Amino acid sequence: MFSERSVTDRLREKSRIPASSALVLGIGDDCAIYRPRGSADDLLFTTDMCIEGVHFETGTHKPAEIAYVALARSVSDIAAMGGRPRFSLVSVALGEQKPMPALFDALAKYAAEFEAPLAGGDLARSDRMFLDVMVAGSVPRGTALRRAGARPGHEIWVSGALGGSALGLEKKTGKAWRRHVRPQPRIELGEFLRSKLRATACMDLSDGLSLDLERLCVASGCSADIAEPPRFPGATLEQALHGGEDYELLFTVRPGTRVPAQFNRIPLTRIGNIGVGAAGEVRLNGARLPGLGYDHLRR
Amino acid sequence: MFSERSVTDRLREKSRIPASSALVLGIGDDCAIYRPRGSADDLLFTTDMCIEGVHFETGTHKPAEIAYVALARSVSDIAAMGGRPRFSLVSVALGEQKPMPALFDALAKYAAEFEAPLAGGDLARSDRMFLDVMVAGSVPRGTALRRAGARPGHEIWVSGALGGSALGLEKKTGKAWRRHVRPQPRIELGEFLRSKLRATACMDLSDGLSLDLERLCVASGCSADIAEPPRFPGATLEQALHGGEDYELLFTVRPGTRVPAQFNRIPLTRIGNIGVGAAGEVRLNGARLPGLGYDHLRR
């Protein structure tokens, strides 16, 4: 029995990066960070899979929706570090009968809209449809937002309202479904958090607040105390706490930072504080909140 | 019915890269090329999938062999452009019962040996094992070897002996099998071709000489006349011409370039000349040689 964390911990331990490497950050954050010789920018790299039967079903998801979400997941990781997307590589495996033109056209179109034009990839036949999207982004050198910078006393904030994607997956209709198939990566917000608010830590909410906040706290070596987060209309507390794929930003700021009530009409809500408890411990209204979000290996 | 070329042509057409982009080269070569602001180096990016039942079988390939080949395929693309590997991202989907520690440990180990340490990736559950490996490399700015630089009169050369991997897949034993499961990406040779011989075009032989030479000729807008290539001991002419996964380098040089008979004990053999015929036309001993190598979509 493996969990995602056990595997990433093992890989990180085994993947010692030479001191001479231009890799600034390896496994364990939303993106890897690479600093080219002489470059004014640090480059960000992230990759995310979308697998038929795991992340989507061809019966319920249209090709354009599959393409959009596959790209949005990686673009959101760039947003989480305060970066701008620069280009993408897309690997696609699919069967003969699959609607390839619609899928490929949508990949090219949405990649351009996300300012991450397709620069390459790989193609293969497979009865099970499979996509893997790598997006590269950039930030001014040394400024990428990371998970590890939260400290006791820092305030915990989230953008938007949570649980909409989980609700959409349940209802398969309405605004919540649209939320599920058209999540909005928070690129401009990420840049604002990096350059204006100087957020101390940031990540995107891909696997559910409970698990993602636990990860942020583990990376930062501290605990968190939160109240109930803002809910997407109709979403249960359960969905808001543990539902994945909202792609809102979870971030921390130094106490007293003037965070606006909204940014580009996206509400920003303070949900709690970073504490001095055991690393990774999250409490909701004083009670221990287990990280029940989506672990990609433990199902 | 789709061919790999019809899809990549379509994607390239739809993926217009803005003039302001730092992408120097997009879809259609062994790697994409990105030039960071102020950087002394150009960065190279390539990605390759390895899918259970398509590229390997868990019954015949050990986890370490799967990991090795998955990495070697992308590292070979970096070699084809004369670059050095810098880091890698690995996406892995696999089932609960699969030998994960051996696979992940081998990925970390071989990535380090290829000087492409694991910097991140993605994990998912799937009954069908699936890997996608992205390798980033670098070359001094403006020096990457491409497919498009061959011109009539240039000499056509290959490294090593061809058909060994196809023979190995047939025999499942001996030196040919070892060739199949432990191909050697030609990193040092690629650097030599770029910096010393100033090769005019280069690519790696992943899908068979006939198809790969056709691709080089299409990219360069010219034809090729070749004689029989050097064969791996025991390989048929068919295997040497059309068998994939040898990962030797195919390159062109200006006439009169002093190419050594071998480099680091790897034989270098002149097999023909670039001609003025129709773009992509390849002739073997004067007769048309169809591109029968491995097309990943047309099977």
Image (cartoon, coloured by chain):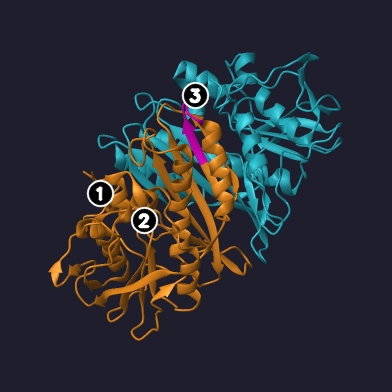
Chain colours: A orange, B cyan
Q: Which residue is mark 1?
A: A3
Kindly identify which chain the residue marked by label 1 belongs to.
A
State which tag comes first along the sequence, 2 or 1: 1
Residue A243 painted magenta: no
- Relative to B166, residue A148 above or below: below
Instruction: Mark 3 or mark 2: name the one nearer the start of the chain.
Output: 2
Q: Is residue B114 left or right of residue A176?
A: right
Image point (41%, 74%), residue name:
A262
Q: Please give the residue where the numbered disc 2 appears in the rendered image.
A: A12
Left or right, A193 with respect to A88, comes to left
Residues behind callouts 2 and 1 on a single chain: yes
Question: How many other residues sit within 10 Å of disc 3, few (<14), some (14-19) or many (≥20)?
Answer: some
Residue A18 visible to an observer of this rendering: no
Specify whether residue A93 is painted magenta: yes
- Image quadrant containing the N terminus of chain A: top left
Q: Nearer the viewer, mark 2 or mark 1?
A: 1
The C terminus of chain A - image quarter: top left
The magenta region covers A91-99
Q: Residue type at mark 3?
A: Glu
* Amino acid type, callout 1: Ser
**Badge nearest the viewer, 3 or 2:** 3
For the residues marked 1 and 3, what is the alpha-carbon distance in whole angstroms? 34 Å
Please tell me which residue lies in front, A269 or B200.
A269
Reading the image, the residue beneath label 3 is A96
The extreme bottom residue here reads: A256
Whole-angstrom CA distance, mark 3 to mark 2, is 38 Å
Residue A124 versus residue B187 in the image, above or below: above
Q: Position of residue A26 (x, y in %)?
A: 43, 59
